[in-house]
Amino acid sequence: MSASVVNGTRTGPIVAVNPVAKLAAALLIALPLVLTIDPVSAATALTLESVLFALSGLRWREFWLRTLPVWIAAPLTALTIALYGTASGTIHIEWLFVRVSDGSLELALATFFRVLAIALPGVVLFVTVDPTDLADGLAQLVRLPARFVLGALAGMRLLALLGDDWRALGLARRARGVADAGRVRRTLGMAFALLVLSIRRGSKLATAMEARGFRGHIVDAGARPVPRTWARPSRWGAPEWMLLAAGAAISTIALTVAVAAGSWNFIFGPT
């Protein structure tokens, strides 16, 4: 994989990789870790994932800002497990429903690393994903129905307008003198108005897409189907295979280390 400049100033070997490969790599890392709850496999995977983080094209400040919700959620989840998890071994604290023991602390540590190891790759890999590139890849490479993919892409593009519509509705209601009602009533009224506006815009967009041939059922004069064309071909090559291999290697090494260390804890196994 060669470094390239994509998305403005972002550079790095992973930035220009096909979004479908990023999605597949994130799944290859996450799915095996879901099968076990132990600190060894998750910590090993997190250590290996740091290489992907360094090659992701994100500056360190942007990395911490983007992943801040994960860093907040992981310790909170671990704290809940430590206080209310299944007790085993020596019990250190017991009060009402709170019971902190060796088993709950070990499970809390495993949960902490597990949340980080599963969530961080998905966040980091998808920061540099353009929705249009992802839609092209899902339709051309994965062969998902073009009508569904393009409809979902159009809906994602319109999500950015919801905030502007909400502010415009608030200003319009204030100008008409109907913004002084109770906060709950005002919020419900604006939410209903936003829903109506979104449905109307979606209907107009669907009509426009039908008129421009986005439906995907184009036929020629002889009633024969015409293959769909794409403005931007989605390509798959060596960089994509290398990223998939890296994702598979992270999972394989993490699980192998856990089994060798004797900490493997299959969640569907006997308790």
Image (cartoon, rainbow, N blue to C red):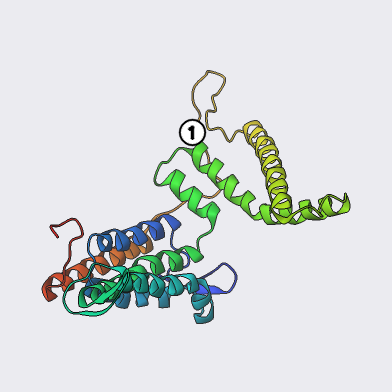
* Whole-percent x, y for residue 236 in the image: 39, 55
Depth check: 186 or 220 in front?
A: 186
Q: Is residue 197 left or right of residue 173?
A: left
Q: Is residue 197 left or right of residue 78?
A: right
**Residue 233 seen from this side:** no
**Residue 140 seen from this side:** yes
Task: Say above or below: 216 vs 25.
Answer: above
Q: Quadrant of the C terminus?
A: bottom left
Depth check: 2 or 240 in front?
A: 240
Q: Amino acid at mark 1?
A: Pro
* Whole-percent x, y for residue 256 in the image: 16, 69
Q: Quadrant of the N terminus?
A: bottom left
Q: State the residue lying farthest toward the front.
A: 96
Q: Which residue is rendered at x = 32% and y = 71% of the image?
A: 96
Q: Which residue is rendered at x = 25% and y = 67% of the image?
A: 249
Depth check: 257 or 189 in front?
A: 189
Q: Is residue 214 left or right of residue 136?
A: right
Where on the picture, by quarter, is residue 206? top right
Depth check: 215 or 256 in front?
A: 256
Task: Say above or below: 133 vs 37.
Answer: above
Where on the picture, by quarter, is residue 118? bottom left
Residue underneath mark 1? 227
* Whole-percent x, y for residue 262 in the image: 11, 73
Q: Secondary structure at mark 1?
A: loop
Query: Tag 1: Cα neighbours inside 10 Å, few (<14), some, or many (≥20)?
Result: few
Q: Which residue is rendered at x = 51% and y = 79% of the image?
A: 59
Task: Say above or below: 262 vs 242.
Answer: below
* Whole-percent x, y for residue 144 in the image: 42, 41
